[in-house]
Image: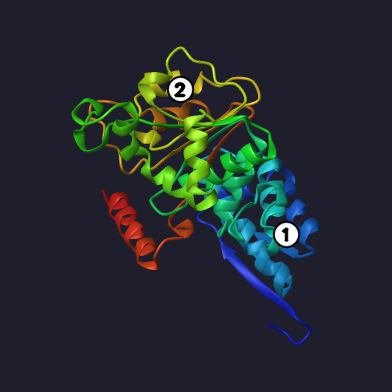
Amino acid sequence: MSDNGTNTASITLDSKDEAILLFGGRDAHLRMIRDALGVRLVARGDTISIDGEAVAVQKAERVFQQLRQTLKHKEKLDPEDVRAMLEIVQAPAERAVSPSLTVQHSGRFVRPRTDGQARYIQAMRDHDVTLCVGPAGTGKSYLAVGMAVTLLRQGAVKRIVLVRPAVEAGERLGYLPGDLIAKINPYLRPLFDAMNEMMEPEQVRRYMENDIIEIAPLAYMRGRTLNHAAIILDEGQNTTVPQMKMFLTRLGENSKMIVTGDITQIDLPRTIRSGMIDAVNRLKKIDRLAIVYLDQSDVVRHTLVQRIVKAYEDTEKKR
């Protein structure tokens, strides 16, 4: 860093093909970043040099990091991808991404803690259907519940519907004791834990009694149309292709649908294709539907969890 508060950074890309996709046609994406952040960008082959005020250079590095992450899962970047990331890095920390997305409970605010989480929140806000793929600890379910509670409190939806396939560890609902609610409750425990952090437990109980909060096994969704609802499907990687299609087509008027899943933890028999893997490949070009990928850099649990996730991902890549 120099005496006048400026800084220089350099990013080396994996290939010239990545550079072409990242820069955009006639370097349109670079111009958007340069104009928004007031930095000087020089692209030579597969290298980008960034020069400007230290804070602006840091923001530009964050933008390029997230856009590169997006490119791992998309064939190309859209100007909207660049605009969304610029909005995220330029948002003041105290207002998260948008005041309308903040959930307050007991004087605490739920905010995104990484750029990837901010992308996820923005996708949920801007799209009718959001698919979020990421490893454990990235806040997929927690932030989905936060969005649902926010929409309910704002009056944008009239109820919250929590759905999860009961396919874990080879067990089925029929083997569990109790009525339907008792059977499905263990599978939805992570969602309830998040909800009880954002709402008073007594209020959650009242909402459940009045069907403002509804829990349902995936199999019970067939034939329904869900209007004015925030619908969360957790552990979406454990759906089959027909189940995922059935679930997504339950979307009704003025509703938001959020599907979360970790495609490295699929409990289906190996001969059955995951509905989530199929969906993220099949639906990636549909308008008003967002697909967000989180990785180990978005893990917000114990720091050791991030290292564990990375170790497993590195092993999978070698295989």
Q: Residue at x 56, y 60 (%)?
A: 113
Task: Tell me which numbered mark, 1 or 2, is placed earlier along the sequence.
Answer: 1
**Whether residue 140 is visible:** no
Query: Dot 1: within a 10 Å radius of its alpha carbon, few (fewer than 14), some, or many (20 or more) residues?
Result: few
For discs 1 and 2, the disc positioned in front in the rendered view: 2
Horizontal side, residue 155 vs residue 133: left or right: right
Q: CA distance from mark 1 to mark 2?
A: 36 Å
Up the image or down, 134 lies above or below 8; here it is above
Question: Disc 1, disc 2: CB below 8 Å?
Answer: no
- Helix, strand or loop at mark 1: helix
Q: Residue at x 51, y 18 (%)?
A: 249
Give me the disc on residue 41: none
Q: How far across and how far down the image is residue 238, in percent? A: 33, 33
Q: Residue at x 29, y 50 (%)?
A: 316
Query: Dot 2: within a 10 Å radius of its alpha carbon, few (fewer than 14), some, or many (20 or more) residues?
Result: many
Quarter of the image where one finds residue 287: top right
Horizontal side, residue 185 vs residue 108: left or right: left
Q: How far across and how far down the image is residue 216, in percent? A: 40, 27
The amino acid on which the numbered mark 1 sits, given as a three-letter code, is Gln
Residue under label 1:
90
Quarter of the image where one finds residue 95: bottom right
Residue under label 2:
247
**Whether residue 82 is visible:** yes
The amino acid on which the numbered mark 2 sits, given as a three-letter code, is Phe
Up the image or down, 218 lies above or below 295; here it is above
Q: How far across and how far down the image is residue 61, in percent? A: 63, 63
